[in-house]
Amino acid sequence: MKMKTLLLGLVSGVLLAACGGPLPEEMDAQEQLGTTQGAVCEGWDSGARLCTWKCTSSAPQWSAVGAGVVAYGQCQSYANAQCGRTAYATCWSK
């Protein structure tokens, strides 16, 4: 019984290690920031220069463009235009 438990744990560990994370993708003008929402928004005053948004609460990823594309104070209106509706969340991030 103990050998069975040991092998099950070993196989599970190997499968988890084999999955890994997503492959890095090239970031273009509209960057994908990831699926987690934690610590995305840092604010313009803290040096954040990416207008970052999610169109819906269930959207899988954040989208972003640099400050060269969106002027300070225009992030919300830019995100709304990209979403075709009021964006669920909008902020400045690094």
Image (spheres, rainbow, N blue to C red):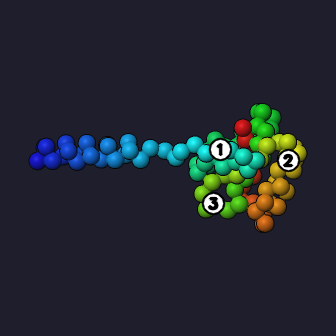
Return the disc, 1 or 2, that comes first in the chain's sequence: 1
Q: Are marks 3 and 2 in contact (CB under 8 Å)?
A: no
Which residue is pictured at 79% across the width and 43% down the height? 66
Q: Nearer the viewer, residue 27 or 41?
A: 27
Please, which residue is most extreme toward the bottom here? Answer: 85
The image shows residue 57, relative to residue 65, as above or below, that is: below
C-alpha span from label 3 to label 1: 20 Å
Q: Nearer the viewer, residue 7 or 76?
A: 7
Q: What type is the residue that disc 3 sits on?
A: Ala
Q: Residue 92: percent from the left, percent from the top? A: 76, 43
Please, which residue is most extreme toward the left here? Answer: 1
Q: Which residue is mark 3?
A: 59
Q: Nearer the viewer, residue 60 or 45?
A: 60
Mark 2 lies on a secondary structure that is loop
Q: Quadrant of the C terminus?
A: top right
Return the disc, 3 or 1, that comes first in the chain's sequence: 1
Q: What type is the residue that disc 1 sits on?
A: Glu
Q: Which residue is mark 2?
A: 70
Which residue is pictured at 75% across the width and 60% down the height? 87
- Number of the label disc, if any, that sits on residue 26: 1
